[in-house]
Amino acid sequence: MELSERKKRILRIIVENYVATAEPVGSKAISAELALSSATIRNEMADLEELGYLEKPHTSAGRVPSPKGYRLYVNELMEEQRLSMEETRQINQALQIKMQELDRVIDQAGKMVAQLTNYPTFALTGGLKRLTIRRFDLIMVDSTSFIVVIMTDSKQVRNKLFKLPTDLSEAQLQLLTTLLNTSFTGKTLEELTPELMRVAEHAAGSAYGLISLVVSFAMECLEDLENRSVYTSGANHLLEHPEYQDVGKAQKLMNYLSDTPRLSSLPLPELSGDDNTKILIGPENVAEELKDTSVVLASYDIGDGMKGVIGVVGPTRMDYAKVAAKLSCVAEGLSHLFGQGELPPGKDGETK
């Protein structure tokens, strides 16, 4: 059933008042904004409740939006919010850092979003698929230790110090480096084990031991990079919202947000095109722990086949327009930072 424009205006007022106050909204608050009688407003509110757009708490005469009401608001009634120049400047300033390890950049972005929104934040990287080792470098430390530095075809770098029970010469280390770069570069994780077995047929025992040591480290690095990484921030912000004054309810959600394996397996919707944000309201979330919450997501492009998603979790009484605008700005900044090494130019705008 298509709602009348009057019903839509009333629903919009209820959503925005409830977001601002966390208190059920009555006819008096609506009549202050619309030139309608209280009786007319009450009738319209009753209709909206019967249609499933509003809910009536047992202890109040006012109404609150239902997940269905929030969905209509997000789809049709919510105005796009543009950030002020100062808000854009703050986000870009926080992201304006030299290219560092991927996890440090995303972790910092997540903490910033938690501070900007006062909601818990999680960030997921989609994982790089079918990585290969581009190059091995072995650096002598002393006669019984050396450092292995590997670079992948996505320009990710990992290193590790190895200590040996016996002496190793510089010439032996150079020979090992040559063999590794000849036989084990350009191969995926699945291809490294068969190659290691092939080399074992020709290499001497001590030489094979060193080769196996380095290749095993390379395989660990590829496996780690190909898995989805998870970063969470600001779970304590839940306690600032009246919906989570019940410590048991807050603890349940905080435990979920700290469960890295469960978060890493969270199915995420496709985010593409000009609109890189997605809003999931209440029951639209797959995880049982998120059924009474809303999640706002924004996607960013890390490059080299790697995608990421940054999300905010909070009560359904959330300022969706403001949160979506801030997340979209951060995601766009991350995409530019990873892709071009710099942030996008600031955009003039104003907060509605």
Image (tube, helix red, strand yellow):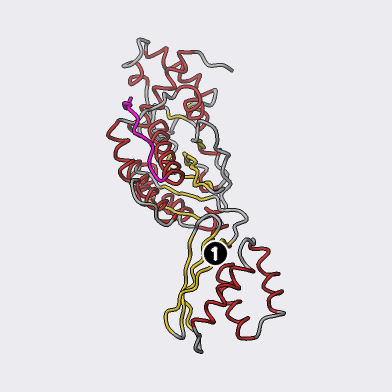
Question: How far across and down, in percent of the image, does residue 84 sit?
Answer: 30, 30
Q: Is residue 135 above or below residue 42?
A: below
Q: Secondary structure at mark 1?
A: strand
In which quadrant will I find the C terminus?
top left
Question: How far across and down, in percent of the image, does residue 42 sit?
Answer: 42, 17
Q: Nearer the viewer, residue 155 or 7?
A: 155
Give yes or no for residue 267 being in the magenta stretch: no
**Residue 68 at least partly seen:** yes
Question: How far across and down, in percent of the image, does residue 203 sit?
Answer: 67, 81
The magenta-colored residue range is 341-352
Q: Quadrant of residue 191?
A: bottom right
Q: Amino acid at mark 1?
A: Arg
The residue labelled by disc 1 is: 135
**Residue 311 at least partly seen:** no
Q: Is residue 129 above or below residue 119?
A: below
Furthest residue in direction front, as rendered:
171
> Residue sitting at 69 percent across and 70 percent down?
195
Labels in figure, total: 1
